[in-house]
Image (cartoon, rainbow, N blue to C red):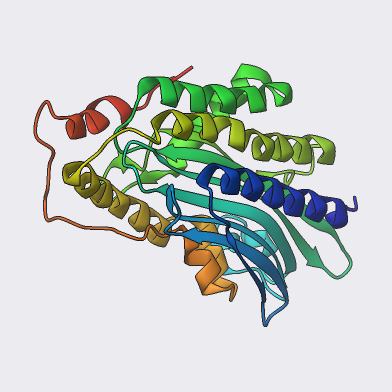
Amino acid sequence: MSIDLVTIKQYFTGLQARIVSELEAFDGLAFRADGWERPGGGGGLTRVIEDGQFFERGGVNFSHVMGDGMPASATAHRPELAGRRFEAMGVSLVLHPRNPYCPTVHMNVRCFVALAEGKAPVWWFGGGMDLTPYYANEDDVRHFHTVCRQAVLPFGGDAEHRRLKEWCDRYFFLKHRNEPRGVGGLFFDDLGADGHTPFDTAFGLTRSVGDAFLDAYLPIVERRRHDSYGEREREFQSYRRGRYVEFNLVFDRGTLFGLQSGGRTESILMSMPPVVHWRYDWHPEAGSPEAQLYEVFLQPRDWV
């Protein structure tokens, strides 16, 4: 079947604009607009904030790129698509608040089309969102997962939410550390690639996840933005941010796709936190708030 890339692109660019508008109102400072073109085809618009009143760094990126061959990160789990031309577009965001009591968040919604002469196009959607707290609050985590569940319910009920929640737990896992990156959320990929999922269902779920992001995240940071913190909390935040960097550079499929496809490096690496520290063989003190993150929140759990 044909796929309406114009409608998909209109949704993605509109989603980026809506999210940036709400985040600017929340922070009080404007996001920089940085349009770019990709030498191999396509381009995008990066919206980024640094040293904001609330966000230490944040980026909301739209990209629409195309090329003559699928990058290795895409064909590693879909080898039958090697050699096909492709188009890929989507919105990806990462927000790093300055306050350690406010969690980092990631959201991505995307669409891929693989093309070959004389063959039907192969299309699929992917996306999700996940929360990475430093000093976690159970009410906040439950709220995030509840909104994620509500976004999925019309597209398969609790069984589908459970599947995407567990997929997120598996995906955002640092194998070399044997620990999760955060408290999870939703993750899905290859939705529609089987040829059996209707386009309206796949695109509908993708839109539902994108549209749910602000409701999932803004109430949390609104509650925590004025919590007081000191040097200890900032040090732990910068230590845990190191896990974020490790995952994005070693495992993240979107980062690898962007770099391997000749994407714009500044836009791809906008997800990196601005201040990060690594410590050698560090462990939190037993009974401390820092230990609670590992013992309570970085454990598999049904939050809703």
Q: Position of residue 169 (x, y in %)?
A: 44, 35
The answer to whether residue 227 shows anywhere in this view is: yes
- Which residue is located at x 14 percent, y 29 percent? 288
Q: Nearer the viewer, residue 303 or 191?
A: 303
Q: Name the quadrant containing residue 6.
A: bottom right
137 with respect to 49 (left or right): left
Q: Nearer the viewer, residue 206 or 91?
A: 91
Q: Position of residue 14 (x, y in %)?
A: 76, 50
Q: Position of residue 51 (x, y in %)?
A: 42, 59
Position of 135 relative to 142 (above/below): below
Q: In the image as oriented, which residue stretches furthest toward the bottom?
A: 39
- Which residue is located at x 54 percent, y 58 percent? 254
Position of 85 relative to 188 (above/below): below
Q: Name the quadrant containing residue 162.
A: top right
- Which residue is located at x 50 percent, y 51 percent? 94
- Which residue is located at x 77 percent, y 36 percent? 204
Disc count in the image? 0
302 with respect to 232 (left or right): right
Q: Position of residue 259 (x, y in %)?
A: 52, 71
The answer to whether residue 189 shows anywhere in this view is: no
Position of 2 relative to 147 (above/below): below
224 with respect to 176 (left or right): right
